Image: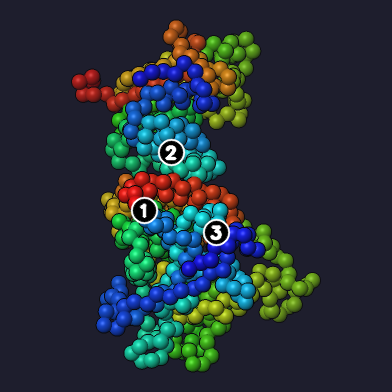
Amino acid sequence: MSTPSSASNNLRYDLSVIASWIEPKSKVLDLGCGEGTLLSLLRDTKQVIGIGIEKNEAKAISCIEKGLTVIQGDITAEVEDYNDNAFDYIILSQTLQQVYEPAQLLHRLLRIGRRVIVSFPNFSHWRSRLHLLLKGRAPKTEQLPYEWHNTPNIRVITIDDFRHFVRQQGCVIRREEAINTHHHDTAGHQVRLFPNLLATYAIFLLEKKLKAES
Amino acid sequence: MSTASPQSDQGSSVGKVAKRFFTFAEQQEAMPLESGARIGPVTLAYETYGELANNKDNVILVLHALSGDAHAAGIHGSDDPKPGWWDTLIGPGKGIDTDRYFVICSNTLGGCMGSTGPASINPATNRPYGLDFPMITIADMVAAQKRLIDALGIPRLLAVIGGSMGGMQVLDWSVRYPGMVFAAIPLATTMRHSPLAIAFNEVARQAIMADPNWNKGDYYHGKHPDLGLAVARMIGHITYLSDDALRNRFGRKLQDRNDFSFNFGADFQVESYLHHQGKKFVDRFDANSFLYLTRAADYFDLVRDESEEHVATVFAKAMARFLVVSFTSDWLYPTYQSRAMVKAMKKSGCDVSFCEIEAQCGHDAFLLPIKRLATIIKGFLDRVHTEFRQQQPAL
């Protein structure tokens, strides 16, 4: 498995990293799948059997128009209806920061999927830190462009906070990558040094803790 | 068979079409019904549009709602220029593209648009059946359609699609003949008729049965229960619209007057509209058929047992890929009923897509030219057609 150095197809960079982690022919649930860009890519290049959940009607329509299997609905409610281990991967890309009860959702996901891939904007990027430090106002960046009163991102997550959260929830990180993106997030590179300070996004692959690991 | 004429004045209409008839279950082999009764012979009226592919991999069965008929697209001729009830969706280049698919629309058993129903002649008495017509169910309608599809030599349907009572038939098809249904599109429908829907139907039936002309269903040689049937249709139309739709369309506007008449005439536009719909309906529909079809819808219940374990088994046999669609302002079969259906499908491990389309026009939305509806139907059919062809052995 290789990590793409840059994206040539206008795919959001974090999504191209996620796509590179997915094994061919797996069963994938994409939560907050938007207009189905990732699901289409996985179907066309990796013969993945994909299902998407998307709240927005126009986006869900766009997915179904593309021939994807997508349910318009709320992710927290929709994931309840699947059987245990129904999926090889569950993808929660740039959605966790908008979830009201992240811990509850993570447990539901680990029930219905063997692996959960989570990506989120890193709130402790140096630009956010400087913004708050120097301007004294809520950080506003290319990755988190909203004002405090109109942001859908109700959770502020840093890479270190997320690692801590995962440990508390009793699951393990199998893979992770911190990235720095540019060009409207379609290009980027891996951040190896001081990711909590230098990465704009982080991507984690989580699994349930095996009995031997507890 | 239809005459495809994309170059004609009809533009993207399928052009001139003809109603055809299929008769089966002659006396000695009468069709068994869910109630235990038998009926025969049975005739179904149907129409077809587009061309059947050599390997028969492009067949779409369209199922109509309570008051619909086999005439779903095109026109019957210059003397009958009214386009079919789903002409906005079925035709060359449309949501259901007749350049690609062979579309069959069958009238339901119990109807009055060319198929066997209570107005048909009972061979035992040589008089119209009336209330001697056996009670029929959605399952019986589907079983009759299955006979038609068999007779046409079609082993497997690419898709079945229908809204409202047609959607109930879609759901029934998907579990009764799972091997024959590759994809299913139930629109604005429900797994089980709600008490609200049953209540409206019962009021409508009572209106018909309270009409002195109804005469316990035996009226075919005299005056028909037109008033009762018109009132039944008026009730139906209220349920097909919505609070928003009525408010936007009519408000409290008066009809052909500037002030109240201070009598019980149709002062309001909404009253005038309902009267008009009622009058129009009695010219084309049989009151007894209305009783039987609404009863069949009321009896429809794929769930039967509401326990969670049971709901998970409702679609266990189904092999179809599903596309479920509801409409925001539908208060006859509200979205929560479609969501329950999707939930049951998910629990049964079915491949299901679902969308709730924003529409102000109520339950009738599925009959209207809504671009988003045509878009997803087209995209979904594209996909299942590809998958179906991959599974079919090449000729």
Q: Position of residue A190 (x, y in %)?
A: 45, 13
Identify the chain of the residue marked 1, using the numbered disc in the image: B
Which residue is disc 1 drawn over? B182
Q: Residues within 10 Å of mark 1 (few under 14, many from 20)?
A: many
Q: Secondary structure at mark 3?
A: strand
Front one among B5 and B299: B5
Mark nearest the camera among 2 and 1 is: 1
Q: Do discs 2 and 1 share a chain?
A: no
Which residue is disc 3 drawn over? B91
Q: Position of residue A161 (x, y in %)?
A: 43, 17
How far is disc 2 from disc 1 in space, using C-alphas?
21 Å
In the image, is residue A104 above or below residue B334?
above
Residue sitting at 58 percent across and 62 percent down? B5
Q: Quadrant of residue B63?
A: bottom left
Residue sitting at 36 percent across and 53 percent down? B182
> Is the residue under label 3 in contact with that under label 1 (CB below 8 Å)?
no
